[in-house]
Image (cartoon, grey):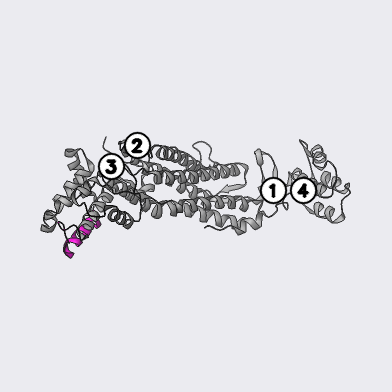
């Protein structure tokens, strides 16, 4: 069967293909080859500009422009040519080296310096910087903006619904009231923390040869300060230089990043499940979309499918992110290739995450609070005022306050009249009695509204 969105094995390249287009620029095989090309070209330019490497360069302005254009105009057809060479070499990075020689064979300066293409490099020098740039680009241009959109939406909802009281349900049972906005503000605060932690993770890079000791470099130029030169090259790419490695950069920073995404995804899974439950209780309505069908047999249904889709994809993402984080920092002795095939799945893991973010945001955009349902729920939960009554009794020094309220309320149908009769019977100061008698489940929300209004996306 010819490949298409209908015959693709992965739904990322099939059913959800269009929604993941932004990630293809960073995690497709084409993208990997393009970033490799960038690193190879930049390394050749750096060698040509070094004053102590006289055998290459300095290149003319025209040659430097030609090298830059090769990167800027790199296209899918170029990647296909490199793949064709790989069929012969059975080595992807070596295929790129041969392609560069062919592509630049019309430039006398490059031909004279052709042996300095991939000079002193092991494939992992090229690959690890490519992977670092792929992750940096996807993070700043696709993933963080998608997460930010959720946080901004939740913040706006938290402010709009800050004063709308809601019965809390600890252990699934009626509990001390809160507000809808405050519950959403809790999620914003958690996402803010993970965003801050994500911002502290710096991706690392190495460029130190076959086993990390600059062996080949020194054999050719023993007096050159290779660690300093390679550090400047890595840092110029916006990555943190890692001076101590085997043949591979150990991927610890990538593992940190995957764990950070996993924690953030878990927060959103928690949100999805809570909102799903609130929709089930009727606390939220979902705006019906024109032409959309909720059930093949029950015409009335408007299912919370966006939150279910988000939960499912974020769960898949976390399973893959967990494997990436656990596997990538492990390499037998100075190098084995088990990381190579696993690294090719970074886009799969982060792609499921992006689908989860997209679905969650779509679901949040359909939500409408149901004040009448929330109010009715609170009106039938007067037992939640047992907490403030026994707390004020404790303040007044009345004995066995908790047990007396437990005996009065636990497992019983409680209404306003019963509680008010109990309050009036207590030997409390008039000010305390007045305050307790004025309370309703809907007004017993503490600082929830103020906390919700104070939340901000960081």
Residue 51 at what x, y percent from top left? Answer: 20, 61
Name the residue at 59% across, 50% down.
Answer: 186
Q: Is residue 72 in the magenta section? A: yes
Q: Are the residues tagged 3 and 1 within 8 Å (C-beta)?
A: no
State how far apart marks 4 and 3 are (Cα): 67 Å
Residue ID for mark 3: 211
Determine the secondary structure under disc 1: strand
State how far apart marks 2 and 3 are (Cα): 13 Å
For residue 348, which numbered disc appears in the image? Answer: none
Residue ID for mark 1: 177
Say which of marks 2 and 4 sits in front. Answer: 2
Determine the secondary structure under disc 3: loop
Give whichever of 104, 146 is nearer the camera: 104
Left or right, residue 94 beside residue 304: left
State how far apart marks 2 and 1 are (Cα): 52 Å
Say which of marks 4 and 3 sits in front. Answer: 3
Circle 3 packing at 10 Å, graded few (<14), some (14-19), many (20+), is some
Give whichever of 57, 33 is nearer the camera: 57
For residue 388, which numbered disc appears in the image? Answer: 4
Say which of marks 3 and 1 sits in front. Answer: 3
Q: Is residue 146 visible?
A: no
Q: Is residue 343 visible?
A: yes
Q: Residue furthest bottom?
A: 61
Say which of marks 2 and 1 sits in front. Answer: 2
Q: Are the residues tagged 2 and 1 within 8 Å (C-beta)?
A: no
Circle 2 packing at 10 Å, graded few (<14), some (14-19), many (20+), is some
For residue 331, which numbered disc appears in the image? Answer: 2
Left or right, residue 372 beside residue 339: right
User: Magenta part of the protein: which range?
Assistant: 52-74
Residue 36 at what x, y percent from top left? Answer: 26, 49
Q: Total marks drawn? A: 4
């Amino acid at each position: 069967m010819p490949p298409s969105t209908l015959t693709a094995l992965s739904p990322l390249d099939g059913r959800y293909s269009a929604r993941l287009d932004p990630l293809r620029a960073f995690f497709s095989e084409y993208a990997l080859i393009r970033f490799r090309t960038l690193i190879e070209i930049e390394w050749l330019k750096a060698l040509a500009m070094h004053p102590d490497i006289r055998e290459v360069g300095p290149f003319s302005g025209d040659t430097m422009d030609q090298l830059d254009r090769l990167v800027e105009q790199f296209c899918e057809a170029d990647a296909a040519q490199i793949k064709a060479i790989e069929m012969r070499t059975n080595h992807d990075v070596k295929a790129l080296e041969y392609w560069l020689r062919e592509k630049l064979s019309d430039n006398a300066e490059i031909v004279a310096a052709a042996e300095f293409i991939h000079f002193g490099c092991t494939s992992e020098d090229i690959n690890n910087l490519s992977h670092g740039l792929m992750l940096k680009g996807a993070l700043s241009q696709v993933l963080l903006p998608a997460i930010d959109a959720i946080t901004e939406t939740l913040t706006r909802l938290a402010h709009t619904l800050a004063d709308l009281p809601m019965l809390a349900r600890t252990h699934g049972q009626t509990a001390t009231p809160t507000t809808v906005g405050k519950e959403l503000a809790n999620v914003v605060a958690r996402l803010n923390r993970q965003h801050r932690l994500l911002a502290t993770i710096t991706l690392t890079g190495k460029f130190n040869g076959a086993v990390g000791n600059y062996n080949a470099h020194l054999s050719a130029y023993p007096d050159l300060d290779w660690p300093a030169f390679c550090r400047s090259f890595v840092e110029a790419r916006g990555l943190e230089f890692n001076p101590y490695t085997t043949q591979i950069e150990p991927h610890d920073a990538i593992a940190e990043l995957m764990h950070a995404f996993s924690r953030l995804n878990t927060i959103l899974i928690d949100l999805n499940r809570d909102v799903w439950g609130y929709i089930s209780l009727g606390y939220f309505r979902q705006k019906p979309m024109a032409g959309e069908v909720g059930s093949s047999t029950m015409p009335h249904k408007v299912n919370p499918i966006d939150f279910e889709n988000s939960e499912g994809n974020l769960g898949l993402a976390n399973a893959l992110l967990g494997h990436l984080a656990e596997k990538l920092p492990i390499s037998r002795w100075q190098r084995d290739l088990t990381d190579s095939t696993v690294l090719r799945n970074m886009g799969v893991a982060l792609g499921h995450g992006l689908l989860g973010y997209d679905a969650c945001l779509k679901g949040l955009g359909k939500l409408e609070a149901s004040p009448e349902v929330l109010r009715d729920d609170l009106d039938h939960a007067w037992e939640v005022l047992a907490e403030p009554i026994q707390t004020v009794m404790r303040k007044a020094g009345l004995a066995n306050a908790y047990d007396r309220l437990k005996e009065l309320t636990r497992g019983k149908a409680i209404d306003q009249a019963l509680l008010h009769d109990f309050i009036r019977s207590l030997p409390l100061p008039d000010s305390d009695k007045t305050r307790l008698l004025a309370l309703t489940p809907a007004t017993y929300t503490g600082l929830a509204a103020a906390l919700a209004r104070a939340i901000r996306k960081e």
